[in-house]
Amino acid sequence: MPSVATHRPRASDQQNGDAMPLSNTLISPPSLYSSPFLPGYSTFDGNDHSAETDSTYSSPSYVDFAVNHDPRFPTMEPLSREELERFQKLSNEYEPELQGPLVSAKQSSQSIASEYSNADPTYVAKTNALAVTHPFTRVMKGDGNCGWRAVAFGYFENLLSLRDAVKAQQELARIKSMSRLLDQVGHQEYLYETFVDATEEAFNQVIDSINKGVPDEGFLVNIFNDFNESMSIITHFRLLTSSWMKLNHIRYQAFLSTPLDQYCSTQIEPTKTEIDEVGLQGLVDSVIEGSGFAVEILYLDRSQGDAVTPHLLSPNRQTVATIKLLYRPGHYDLLYSAEPPTIQMSPIVNYQYGMTMNYTPWDGGALSFDMNPHLMSIPGLMMDPSPYTPASSSIMPATSQGFMPSTPQHEFYSPSLSPSVSTTVSSPTTSNLPLSPIQSKPDGPQIRLNPLVMKPNLSHSLPVTTPFKK
């Protein structure tokens, strides 16, 4: 009769160290019926064992006896240690297939508030405030590259929003020149040139879109939703960050618990490894800072306050644009600030009235003095110089009610200490002057007349009438 019993140790057996080896779990038929674990079994064999000691006796283990194995079902062979470790590794590395694009279209931040509507009150308050201060967001696929992808996409998007083709050309030249960093740390050009080409192609499309006046960033979304193109750009940024950190190890080593080279080879360079704070600072220092862009992280956590906690990674300097990242544990997305309100104001119009629109220079021979042609070309001057002929030239006396025109001489008269010399100009009496009634100043805008060409019978200013009144 074959062996039919197997031993199944219980948890209490493992704690007491009484588990039976697998080789001792098979019991032969004679011992099966004489087992002390069967009901009615008696240990009396006719001899008195009361004097024997129990020094070698151990408490028996519980054994379950199964029925004979059904040949219809295959038996499972025990797994070796190597196989168990392999299955454990596969279990740890398993990731469910995520749905959605690598980079989503810009959408309302109300979706984040709805996601946390039934969460902790702190999250509810912060997400509601976030929807006001940053009304739009762009979701990154959480495949382990979300942080790298968010920074890379935000970099190209801000570069496009500047609408400066010269700036984009300068950035392309700067990024291409950083290939020397890859050479300095030992990377071979034939290994990374594919990644550089993908980044250069993205720059060329940005420059072409700026020159053509493409209004939106739809082409950028298409580039980053192409898996090969997206991963090539991200890998290029990873290699630049790793090389920069290795060449500036003093800045970063103090924040790491492992050697910097090991950190870069395990956390920065491999794909599907999420970026941490040290790696993000290295990415900003190496790739982003030279562009003049800033990077700001807004932490959505349970810290005090009703708003997300901002943290600016870039130094305190003037920046042309800011890449805003929303961080939730293990995931990064892009945020967009609210646009400042546009104030609609009617333009302020400065109305200037003129008596004529003829800009033809005057004939200097019609006046008794050498006029300045530049002065007399001013629009609005009256074109009838007849009152000021040599025969009727006179000087109007200064009165408190009017304006005295200039003397019709080339040079102004000034008194001197020498004996007086008679001049050809004589002071007219007030009786020779045309008299006009004193008029009160009219209300409303007025036209100021040039005294050089003012007719004697005109007031010094005229009220604006139709068609000048508006």
Image (cartoon, grey):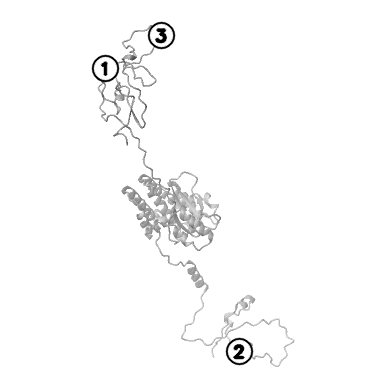
Q: Residue at x 46, y 86 (%)?
A: 72
Question: Which element is circle 3 on?
Answer: loop
Determine crowd level at label 2: few under 14, some 14-19, many 20+ residues with C-alpha closer than 10 A. Answer: few
The residue lying furthest to the top in this view is 419
From the viewer's perspective, is residue 398 above or below residue 294? above
**Kind of residue at badge 1:** Thr
Q: Residue at x 49, y 55 (%)?
A: 129
In depth, the one of 303 and 99 nearer the eye is 303
**Kind of residue at badge 3:** Leu
Q: Position of residue 376 (x, y in %)?
A: 29, 24
**Kind of residue at badge 2:** Ser
Tell me which numbered mark, 1 or 3, is placed earlier along the sequence: 1
Residue that mark 2 sits on: 31
Horizontal relation, residue 376 to residue 146: left or right: left
Q: Position of residue 402 (x, y in %)?
A: 36, 21
The residue lying furthest to the bottom in this view is 46
Residue that mark 3 sits on: 417
Q: Mark 1 or 3, which is nearer the eye?
A: 1
The residue lying furthest to the right in this view is 51
Question: Which element is circle 2 on?
Answer: helix
Q: Quadrant of residue 137?
A: bottom left
Question: Which element is circle 1 on?
Answer: loop
Horizontal relation, residue 308 to residue 177: left or right: right
Quarter containing the C terminus: top left
Tell me which numbered mark, 2 or 3, is placed earlier along the sequence: 2
Q: CA distance from mark 2 to mark 3?
A: 156 Å
Residue that mark 1 sits on: 389
In depth, the one of 333 and 179 nearer the eye is 333
Horizontal relation, residue 418 to residue 69: left or right: left
Q: Position of residue 283 (x, y in %)?
A: 46, 52
Quarter containing the N terminus: bottom right
